[in-house]
Image (cartoon, rainbow, N blue to C red):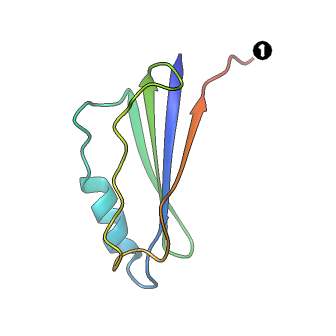
Amino acid sequence: MTVALMWEARAVPGRGEELLAWARAQEPAVRPLRREVLRAPQDRVLVITWWEAEFDAELPELPEPTEELVTRAVHRWRFESVATD
């Protein structure tokens, strides 16, 4: 089964590039199958990693950035891939 971990944070206004650089620099102890880093308006950063694992497997998560860099706690979601017809 393929599991996708999604990590999304919103930077303090004007610090989006710094949050983006911070997220890019985070290296998990184990490499995922795939990793994608995205950004959006309002200085938001999204990181999606794909893993070959069971849905409830213990997987390396991106940590919380320092409080000075973000406006709120990080949002995290976990999804499993499903077959398409």
Q: Identify the secondary structure beneath mark 1.
A: loop
- Residue 62 versus residue 39 in the image, above or below: above
Q: Residues within 10 Å of mark 1 (few under 14, many from 20)?
A: few
Q: Position of residue 59 (x, y in %)?
A: 38, 32
Q: Nearer the viewer, residue 78 or 58?
A: 58
Q: Nearer the viewer, residue 39 or 65?
A: 65
Q: Amino acid at mark 1?
A: Asp
Residue with the most extreme bottom position: 14
For residue 27, what is the image quadrant?
A: top left
Q: Position of residue 55 (x, y in %)?
A: 54, 24
- Residue 45 versus residue 34 in the image, above or below: below
Residue at figure coordinates x 73%, y 18% from the top left:
84
User: Residue 74 vs residue 83: left or right?
Assistant: left
For residue 17, what is the image quadrant?
A: bottom left
User: Residue 60 vs residue 5: left or right?
Assistant: left
Q: Mark 1 = which residue? A: 85
- Residue 34 versus residue 85 in the image, above or below: below
Q: Nearer the viewer, residue 33 or 73?
A: 73
Residue at figure coordinates x 50%, y 19% from the top left:
54
Residue at figure coordinates x 25%, y 30% from the top left:
30
Residue at figure coordinates x 49%, y 39% from the top left:
5
Q: Position of residue 12 (x, y in %)?
A: 43, 81
Q: Position of residue 1 (x, y in %)?
A: 53, 15
Specify the quadrant that holds the C terminus: top right
Q: Nearer the viewer, residue 23 or 57?
A: 57
